[in-house]
Image (spheres, rainbow, N blue to C red):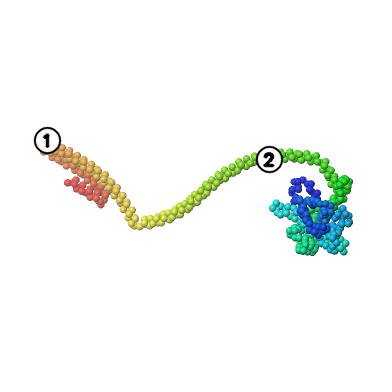
Amino acid sequence: MTATHDPEAAAPPRAAQSKPARFKPTRAGIINLWDYFDEEFAFGDGRLALRGHNGSGKTKALEVLFPFVLDGGLDARRLDPFSGENRTMKANLLYRGQDAEHGYVWMEFGRPAGPDEPQETVTLVIGLTAHKNWERARPSFFITTQRMGIDFGLLSADSRPLTAKQLAAILGRDASFGDRRGAYQDAVDTRLFGLGRERYTQLLDLLIALRRPLLAKDLDPVKVSGTLSAGLSPVDEDLVEQAARDFENLAAVQKQYDDLAAADAAVRAFLTQYTAYLRAHTRHQVDQVTARASAAASHVAAIITAVRAAAAAGRQEQQAREAGESARISVDTFQARLSALKDRDAYKDHEKLALRRSQLEQDKTRLAQDQQRLASARANVDSLQREADAVASRRDELGGARVGRADHDRRRVVRREGVDRVLERLSLVDARAGGADADHVGAEALRRELKR
């Protein structure tokens, strides 16, 4: 038994995967109703199979559980298509002849919320109260996210069913809908299906129609069609025409699908090759980027070194400027001191002394030259003396007195002429030297020696 009927269940798998999972019944229960005191049924993947002999309560369980928990209607025809108007909900509650009784039916729906999240659950609870003086039982409706038997219970400490007020106090005001069946149906549709009031009503009618007795024993297409027509509203003519057109276009759609499949295969083959090309190209580009990054790192290191060198050079330049400025100040200071020294009398006397010393050096040089000439003249005189001695010796040899006197006079003349030339040069030296130094004294001594 499935809990829902979803017209979109036949949608393509890819579209269904994009929607959240549907709610499926996981558990259901009956409390204090007919022969069931506190019975719980477990569903497997939204399905429930009931087995048992006739009269064991299979039909009664279906009658009070499904689709009663979705519908909430107490009409006997909607509860039990088999028995007509005989088995009412009041009869189910007062089955053992009690004066008044409370009972509950509930069903839990669940769906996975996410890979790492707990299952999302919704529990539908319908409380039923009957009294022998009432014409029919009175329902109360509840919808909660709490779990029956885990977060709350429907029996009191003395194992008596709770009243509607007690349960409303436990579940909260938001979970209670009182006896408002329409509000309860809208809330169930909104929480579990999202079909809308009209489609939700059609769903309930179809479920009730499909529960008619012996529907599959003698399968008559006319009866099946009538049953489905009774449970489903007529299909819009526009939808029928659209479906017919869609069938006609199936061949074109199939061809388009085949073309798209071929294009998809071609694109996949191209993508395989192109991916390999892109990987190789990307690897090459990455290698180039790595090489450029290494070169850039080298350039950066060189730039850093150059910046440091430029900074050091700048510091040295600043130091040189400071040293140059200090030197310029020192030069200016020394120039001022030199100018002051030059203005002093001592410096001027020093200049005169230097000039006098230069003149003396020149006179000394000339005196040395005169001494050389004097030595040359003396050598001349010695040569003339030797000649005179030779003449005297010749005269003696010849023995004449007159000749001797003549030679003697001639020697005196020659000697005087030579001495006079020397004295003349010494006078010139005297005039230049001014008679104030040792060279002048030497010249005087030489003059006296020659006059003797």
**Which of the numbered marks, if any, corresponds to residue 398?**
1
Residue at 42 percent across and 54 percent down: it is 327
Q: N-terminal of the two: label 2 or label 1?
A: 2
Residue 303 or residue 353, whichever sits in front: 303
Disc 1 is placed on an element classified as helix
Residue at 19 percent across and 45 percent down: it is 450
Give left or right: position of 356 versus 120: left
Residue 200 screen position, x and y as percent: 82, 53
Query: How busy is the neighbourhood of tag 1: few (under 14 within 10 Å), some, or many (20 plus)?
Result: few
Residue 181 screen position, x and y as percent: 83, 59
Residue 168 seen in the figure: no
Residue at 33 percent across and 53 percent down: it is 351
**Which of the numbered marks, if any, corresponds to residue 271?**
2
Residue 201 screen position, x and y as percent: 84, 54
Residue 275 seen in the figure: yes
Residue type at the position of mark 2:
Leu
